[in-house]
Amino acid sequence: MYQVKRISHSEFVPIRNLTYHVQVWGEPAADKTPLVLLHGWMDVAASYQFVVDALSHSRYVIAPDWRGYGQTSAGGADNFWFPDYLADLDFLLDHYAPQAPVDLVGHSMGGNVAMLYAGVRPERIRRLVNLEGFGMAATTPDEAPGRYAKWMDELKKLHRGELNLKAYEAVSGVARRLMKTNPRLGQEKANWLAQHWAHENAQGKWSILGNPSHKISNAQLYRVDELLEIYQRISMPMLSVEASDNSLELWWKGKFTLAEFHERLQSVPQVEIARIEDAGHMMHHDQPEILAALIERFLTRD
């Protein structure tokens, strides 16, 4: 089993009629800028443990489980709207850092949230780090009818019980699932992650701590013109970190490329791009020491 170096504790914060679970490392102090870590789709806050352990200095670190993930409930929702993540983050920062800006790091979906939030509330962020939060392929208005129809069809599948997540006989099955998805993930880390990524249900099986409603497609189109207007307002320094494995090529098959993402990044006033070798999309699991060093250098640089 992976041996944790920095112990976290759980806090439960009332946010927008939900009780948000927040993983916290360290203690607040007047000379410490809070470091806020946002996890991605079908992940949990504890996923950042390896990176926090690899930091060279102790920091005050705040990592929420998004609504419908980990120990944060879905509040009865049967689908999720992206603006809710921005509002949840806004309330979270009001609670933890009402008077001063924070350093914000987001992975994948969390990276997309972080970039949008940084453009909408630039005064709340001191520095921004995006870990493979690429966004989505551009859409066109003619796709709207089909998108709404797909959304309603998937809602019906959910309510018929056709979109449930697989349950595992033992936590070891969850660990094997994590290693199958990410071949670079070793057994010790997988065993540790499995106990935070899933829980034992009343039937004695291990269920993933992700609401199946997250599998519902977004009913709205992805509007790149709106996105770029927000990117232009990201006024703080930004670091965009990519893995050597090209996930966009795997996911989109040419419909959305890394070159297109880099073109979008040109709208951000102050951005630099870094790359981590021998890493896949879950870079915070694959190369936590290298990632921690990159983040620290960026956050502490004058």
Image (cartoon, rainbow, N blue to C red):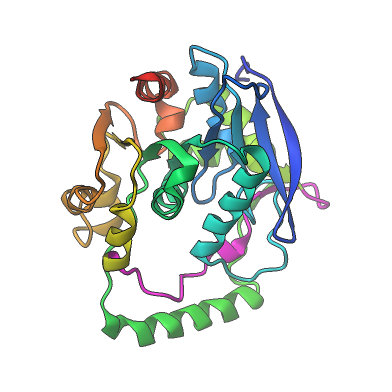
- Residue nearest the viewer, comparing 150 with 18: 18
Question: Residue 89: x and y, percent?
Answer: 57, 50
Residue at 39%, 49% (x, y): give it. Answer: 115
Above or below, comparing residue 90 to residue 178 in the picture: below
Residue furthest to the top in view is 56
Quadrant including the N terminus: top right
Residue furthest to the front in view is 99
Kindly indicate the quadrant of the structure image that contains residue 150: bottom left
Q: Is residue 136 visible in this depiction of the protein?
A: no
Above or below, comparing residue 190 to residue 157 in the picture: above
Residue at 45%, 44% (x, y): give it. Answer: 123
Question: Residue 78: x and y, percent?
Answer: 63, 71
The stretch drawn in magenta includes residue 210? yes
| Residue span colored magenta | 201-224
Question: Residue 40: x and y, percent?
Answer: 49, 46
The stretch drawn in magenta includes residue 294? no
Kindly indicate the quadrant of the structure image that contains residue 140: bottom left
Q: Is residue 26 visible in this depiction of the protein?
A: yes
In the picture, measured across the screen, residue 16 lies left or right of residue 153, that is: right
Is the magenta region chiefly helix, strand or loop? loop
- Residue nearest the viewer, comparing 275 with 192: 275
Above or below, comparing residue 78 to residue 40 in the picture: below
In the picture, measured across the screen, residue 202 lies left or right of residue 228, that is: right
- Residue nearest the viewer, comparing 79 with 23: 23
